[in-house]
Structures are given as C-alpha cells and as structure tokens.
Amino acid sequence: MTTTLKLISAFGIVLFGILFSVTYVSPEKVEETARNFVKSQIEKEILEQQQAISESSITEAVSNIAGRLGLEKEQIQADLQNDLPEKISSC
C-alpha cells in the first residue's frame, strides 16, 4: 500500500515538474496555445447561440418587423457570419 502511494506521488511530482518547466522554457507558446483554445471555445459558443437565436420564433417576428423597416436580414446575417472570427480576435 505504501509503495503504491509512493509511486503515485512520485509520478505526480515528475509530471508536475515537467509541466512546470515547460511553462518557464516557452511561456509564449503556452500563452499562444491558451489564447487559441479560448478563442476557439468562444467562437464555438457564439455560433451555437447564434444558431439557436436564429431558429427561435421571436427571431422570425423581429425579422418581419425588420423587413418592414427595410433592413436586409441576409446582409446582416452574412456580415455576422463572415466577420465573426475577426471581431472576436480584435477584442
């Protein structure tokens, strides 16, 4: 039992030490990787929410009102879909 605990703790120390040293050796790479991960997660969530909103009945009512006011729904949707990654990355 104590041997197993010692092996697990030694493995944890080695693993933590490796990860800790990687952050000191190349902090720019770690930061870039984290930034890209967060950016991709935000894009994914925004696209999912945009899809859910565009499929709701309220969106249809607002779209009808916007059509009456002369707004171009397709142009607005295309602008949102095309410029979404640039808008997120510029923040």
Image (cartoon, helix red, strand yellow):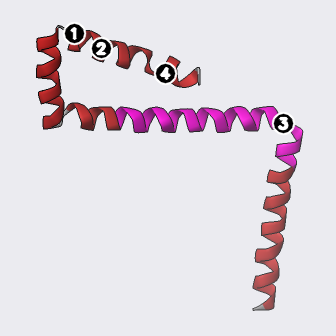
Residue 29, label in figure: none
Residue at 29% across, 14% down: 76
Residue 72, label in figure: 1
Dot 3: within a 10 Å radius of its alpha carbon, few (fewer than 14), some, or many (20 or more) residues? Answer: few
Rendered image quadrant of residue 72: top left
Q: Could you tell me the amino acid type at mark 1?
A: Glu
Between residues 79 and 19, which one lies in front from this camera angle?
79
On the image, the x and y values in percent for residue 32 come to: 70, 31
Residue 76, label in figure: 2
Q: Is residue 43 magenta?
A: yes
Residue 26, label in figure: 3
Dot 1: within a 10 Å radius of its alpha carbon, few (fewer than 14), some, or many (20 or more) residues? Answer: few
Q: Nearer the viewer, mark 1 or mark 4?
A: 1
- Dot 2: what SS? helix
Residue at the disc numbered 4: 85
**Which stretch appears magenta?**
21-48
